[in-house]
C-alpha cells in the first residue's frame, strides 16, 4: 500500500523553509507526495511563496510529486484539515518571543493538542544528516504508536534507540530486552538508573515494537527526576525525540506537560504521535 502524503505548513520564513526541507526528505523516504500548505487572508498572496517552495523541493528531490494549496483562514485549522488525509504533518517552531508569522510556537502547541496524525515539529540546531540517536520518552501517554514509530525510525537511521522512563512506574516488558548504560544523566537533580532487565509502561507498545524491529539496539533507563525535565536535556545528542500524546478538547486545547516541555526546550525535532 502506498504511503499517505506528507503535509507541511509554510509562510516563506527561514523557519518554515527548514520545515519544508525536512518534510520533503520525509516524503522522499516514504515514496509519497508532498503537500505544501500556505494559510493566507487573500489567495492572491500565495503564488510567490508556493512557487518558491515547489522549485526548492524540485531542486532537492527531482521527481518527487509536489502539491501546493493556498487556504484562506487560520493556520491551525488549515493544517489540521490538511492532516486529515496525511500520514504526517510537518511544521516549524518559532519561539513565542519572536516575530509573528505562520509557524509561531503557539501553532505547534495547538496542533500537538488536536492532531489525529503524527506531527513533526522541526526545531533545534542539528541538521537532518548530522546523525544522533533516536530518543523515546515513555510518559503517561506513550503508547503503541509512539513506540513503533521510534523503533522504525531507529531502524531507518541504523542507530540506537534510547528510551527514558520515569522511576515511579511499574514495568513488565519481557526481560529479553537488552540495555546498555548511557554515560552521564540528562537530569543532574536525580541521576539515571541503569536497568538490568529494562521494561516500559505501557509495556504492550514497546514489547510489540521490539517484536517488529528485533535488530534495533535499545538503551533503556529510568530517570529519577521529572521526565519533563530529563527528556529535553537528553535531546542535545538526539536526531529526533518521539513522544505520545492524547487528543485534547475544549475551548483552548493544550498538550500535556511533557509535550509542552519538548516543544519549548528540545534541541532536536520532536515527533508527536497521538494515541489511537
Image: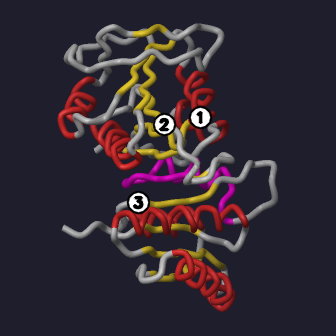
Q: Quadrant of the N terminus?
A: bottom left
Residue at the location (41% across, 81% down)?
Answer: 65
Task: Look at the numbered disc 1 and give the secondary structure of its residue.
Answer: helix
For discs 1 and 3, the disc positioned in front in the rendered view: 1
Q: CA distance from mark 2 to mark 1?
A: 7 Å
Task: Look at the numbered disc 2 and give the secondary structure of its residue.
Answer: strand
Q: Are marks 2 and 1 in contact (CB under 8 Å)?
A: yes
For discs 3 and 2, the disc positioned in front in the rendered view: 2
Mark 3 or 2, nearer chain start: 3
Task: Look at the numbered disc 3 and give the secondary structure of its residue.
Answer: strand
Report x, y in % for residue 243.
Answer: 44, 37
Does residue 108 show up magenta in the picture? yes
What is the quadrant of residue 237 in the picture? top right
Q: How many marks?
A: 3
Q: CA distance from mark 1 to mark 3?
A: 24 Å
What is the quadrant of residue 49 in the picture? bottom right
Q: Residues within 10 Å of mark 2 (few under 14, many from 20)?
A: some
Report x, y in % for residue 261.
Answer: 61, 33
Determine which of the numbered discs, if any, sits on residue 161 in the image.
Answer: none
Which stretch did the figure color magenta?
102-121
Q: Residues within 10 Å of mark 3 (few under 14, many from 20)?
A: many
Front-most of 219 and 22? 219
Report x, y in % for residue 259.
Answer: 53, 37
Determine which of the numbered discs, if any, sits on residue 237 in the image.
Answer: 1
What is the quadrant of residue 107 in the picture? bottom right
Residue at the location (51% across, 60% down)?
Answer: 90
Report x, y in % for residue 149.
Answer: 34, 44
Q: Identify the image's colour scheme: rainbow, by chain, secondary structure or one colour.
A: secondary structure
Q: Which residue is mark 3?
A: 88
Amino acid at each position: 500500500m502506498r504511503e499517505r502524503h506528507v503535509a507541511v505548513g509554510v509562510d516563506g520564513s527561514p523557519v518554515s523553509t527548514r520545515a519544508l526541507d525536512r518534510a520533503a526528505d520525509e516524503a522522499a523516504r516514504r515514496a509519497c507526495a508532498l503537500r505544501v500548505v500556505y494559510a493566507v487572508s487573500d489567495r492572491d498572496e500565495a503564488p510567490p511563496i508556493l512557487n518558491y517552495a515547489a522549485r526548492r523541493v524540485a531542486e532537492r528531490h527531482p521527481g518527487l510529486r509536489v502539491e501546493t494549496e493556498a487556504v484562506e483562514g487560520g493556520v491551525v485549522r488549515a493544517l489540521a484539515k490538511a492532516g486529515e488525509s496525511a500520514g504526517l504533518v510537518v511544521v516549524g517552531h518559532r519561539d513565542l518571543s519572536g516575530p509573528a508569522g505562520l509557524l509561531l510556537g503557539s501553532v505547534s502547541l495547538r496542533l500537538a493538542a488536536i492532531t489525529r496524525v503524527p506531527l513533526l515539529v522541526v526545531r533545534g540546531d542539528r541538521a537532518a544528516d548530522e546523525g544522533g540517536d533516536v530518543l523515546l520518552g515513555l510518559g503517561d501517554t506513550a503508547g503503541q504508536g509512539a513506540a513503533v514509530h521510534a523503533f522504525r525510525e531507529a531502524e531507518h537511521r541504523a542507530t540506537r534507540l534510547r528510551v527514558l522512563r520515569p522511576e515511579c512506574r511499574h514495568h513488565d516488558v519481557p526481560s529479553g530486552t537488552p540495555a546498555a548504560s548511557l554515560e552521564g544523566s540528562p537530569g543532574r537533580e536525580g541521576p539515571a538508573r541503569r536497568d538490568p532487565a529494562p521494561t516500559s509502561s505501557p509495556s504492550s507498545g514497546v514489547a510489540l515494537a521490539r517484536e517488529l524491529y528485533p535488530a534495533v539496539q535499545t538503551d533503556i533507563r529510568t530517570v529519577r527526576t521529572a521526565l519533563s525535565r530529563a527528556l529535553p536535556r537528553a535531546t542535545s545528542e538526539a536526531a529526533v525525540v518521539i513522544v505520545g500524546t492524547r487528543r485534547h478538547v475544549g475551548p483552548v486545547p493544550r498538550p500535556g506537560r511533557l509535550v509542552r516541555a519538548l516543544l519549548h526546550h528540545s534541541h532536536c525535532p520532536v515527533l508527536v504521535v497521538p494515541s489511537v
